[in-house]
């Protein structure tokens, strides 16, 4: 009995010892990711190339074509096992001439910063001039009725909730006025709609973004005012409810255009038939360089693959980076990738997306998967918390990887600090110089570390 007890004790001690060795080994590898990224990382220079040499990359544009060629060439130079393109047809909306907007208050004519919303129709060539009705919600608009709204411009002036700690929650709650405001205003007989930009600060940068027209509803032009301009218009309306507003825009939707997702992979050493994806979206809105949205995610995702290869870490599963096209105004790239995965009988066990800016890493959101899977991922905090990655919890994965969810893929969204993102989101100040190099490279190492732990433990 004594010998059996001694044997069991030895086995337990050996198991604990091996577990500790594994943790120490994992800790060493994670440290190597951060050391390489912070000392010799490529994310920042890749971001500089994408944003300053190519610039805006709206789907269907010349910038988008150049970005595809750039991404393919750069990944081919990395010496990965496979680099290929996936054909995808994308929407092709163009802004046209610079928009104009004016508050017409009696004899005063005050110019305000304004941009067309993505997907909107143009105004007549001479523009639109009409009285303005300010509302905050669709319900408030409906209660006014058609008689009061007929022939007017509806002004949705609901700000993002500044009391929300997570700015993405505030964005989600305010976003319906951008997406569907034109439809709701049109139903009430309005001839145009303007919205308060979805920005977390008071500034002079109007923020664009995608809107969609409903079937069977008359199409009316839609635009966004900067937050400062929206505050000014609201104040002036209280002083003179009969003032008029003028805006002119010349945007249009052209026929769908051919484009591509860009894909590169390292074949798995043990389970090559099981795929782990990491990616971001290659397209951006046309107002700026698309740095935080989503040049940072593109650079970080490519850096994940480079870190694995440079450090000689061969993943057990196939590790694939995808530069998705058309997240901003259609998600055609994400849907096409998922369709091809299903058609090719590919098994994607996890997918990670970086599309929340290049700020200080905070953690990861998890969408899908069992409670056991979530608990296992949360167990990685011990290894990741020394790098500030303390938030590993249920949350959103990402728009591009979302279409993989019905196939049973667990989605993981990389989560940087959210406080500054909506200062730049979809606006003309989303430029390379707003990205901090150290924060960006820390993010890439954080993503690589989580991918490494997923690959090893699942």
Image (cartoon, rainbow, N blue to C red):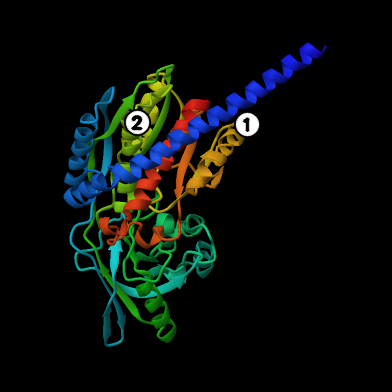
Q: Which image quadrant for residue 70?
A: top left
SS at mark 2? loop
Q: Is residue 119 visible?
A: no
Residue 376 drawn at (x, y percent):
59, 33
Residue 87 drawn at (x, y percent):
26, 30
SS at mark 1? helix
Left/right of residue 107 with respect to residue 3 in the rendered view:
left
Q: Residue at x 28, y 70 (%)?
A: 113
Q: Is residue 246 visible?
A: yes
Q: Nearer the viewer, residue 294 or 242?
A: 294
**Residue ID for mark 1:** 372
Residue 327 drawn at (x, y percent):
35, 43
Q: CA distance from mark 2 to mark 1?
A: 30 Å
Q: Residue at x 25, y 62 (%)?
A: 123
Residue 200 drawn at (x, y percent):
43, 64
**Residue ID for mark 2:** 311
Residue lying at the far right in this picture: please name it.
Answer: 1
């Amino acid at each position: 009995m004594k010998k059996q007890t001694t044997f069991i004790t030895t086995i337990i001690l050996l198991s604990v010892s091996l577990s500790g060795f594994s943790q120490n080994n994992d800790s060493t590898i994670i440290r190597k990711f951060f050391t390489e990224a912070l000392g010799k990382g490529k994310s920042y220079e890749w971001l500089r190339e994408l944003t300053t040499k190519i610039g805006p990359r709206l789907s269907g544009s010349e910038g988008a074509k150049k970005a595809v060629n750039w991404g393919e060439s750069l990944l081919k130079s990395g010496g990965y096992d496979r680099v290929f393109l996936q054909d995808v047809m994308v929407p092709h909306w163009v802004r046209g001439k610079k928009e104009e907007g004016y508050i017409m208050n009696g004899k005063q004519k005050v110019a305000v910063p304004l941009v067309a919303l993505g997907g909107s129709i143009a105004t007549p060539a001479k523009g639109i001039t009409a009285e303005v009705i300010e509302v905050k919600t669709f319900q408030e608009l409906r209660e006014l009725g058609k008689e009061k709204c007929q022939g007017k411009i509806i002004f949705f002036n609901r700000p993002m909730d500044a009391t929300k700690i997570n700015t993405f929650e505030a964005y989600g709650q305010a976003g319906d006025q951008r997406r569907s405001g034109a439809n709701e205003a049109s139903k009430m007989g309005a001839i145009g709609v303007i919205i308060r930009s979805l920005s977390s600060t008071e500034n002079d940068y109007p923020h664009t973004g995608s809107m969609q027209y409903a079937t069977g509803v008359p199409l009316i032009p839609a635009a966004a005012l900067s937050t400062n301009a929206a505050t000014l218009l609201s104040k002036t309306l209280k002083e003179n409810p009969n003032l008029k507003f003028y805006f002119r825009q010349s945007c249009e939707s052209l026929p769908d255009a051919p484009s591509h997702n860009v894909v590169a992979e390292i074949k798995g050493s043990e389970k090559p038939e099981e795929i782990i994806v990491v990616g971001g979206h290659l397209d951006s809105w046309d107002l700026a360089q698309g740095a935080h949205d989503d040049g940072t995610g593109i650079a970080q995702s490519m850096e994940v693959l480079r870190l694995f290869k440079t450090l000689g870490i061969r993943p057990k599963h196939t590790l694939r980076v995808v530069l998705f096209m058309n997240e901003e105004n259609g998600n055609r790239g994400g849907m096409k990738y998922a369709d091809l995965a299903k058609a090719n009988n590919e098994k994607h066990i996890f997918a990670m997306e970086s599309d929340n800016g290049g700020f200080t890493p905070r953690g990861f959101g998890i969408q899908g998967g069992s409670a056991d899977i979530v608990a296992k991922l949360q167990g990685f905090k011990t290894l990741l918390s020394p790098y500030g990655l303390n938030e590993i919890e249920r949350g959103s994965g990402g728009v591009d990887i979302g279409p993989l969810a019905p196939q049973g893929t667990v989605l993981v969204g990389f989560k940087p600090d959210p406080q500054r993102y909506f200062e730049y989101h979809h606006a003309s100040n989303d430029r390379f110089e707003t990205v901090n190099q150290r924060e960006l490279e820390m993010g890439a190492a954080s993503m690589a570390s989580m991918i490494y732990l997923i690959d090893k433990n699942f």
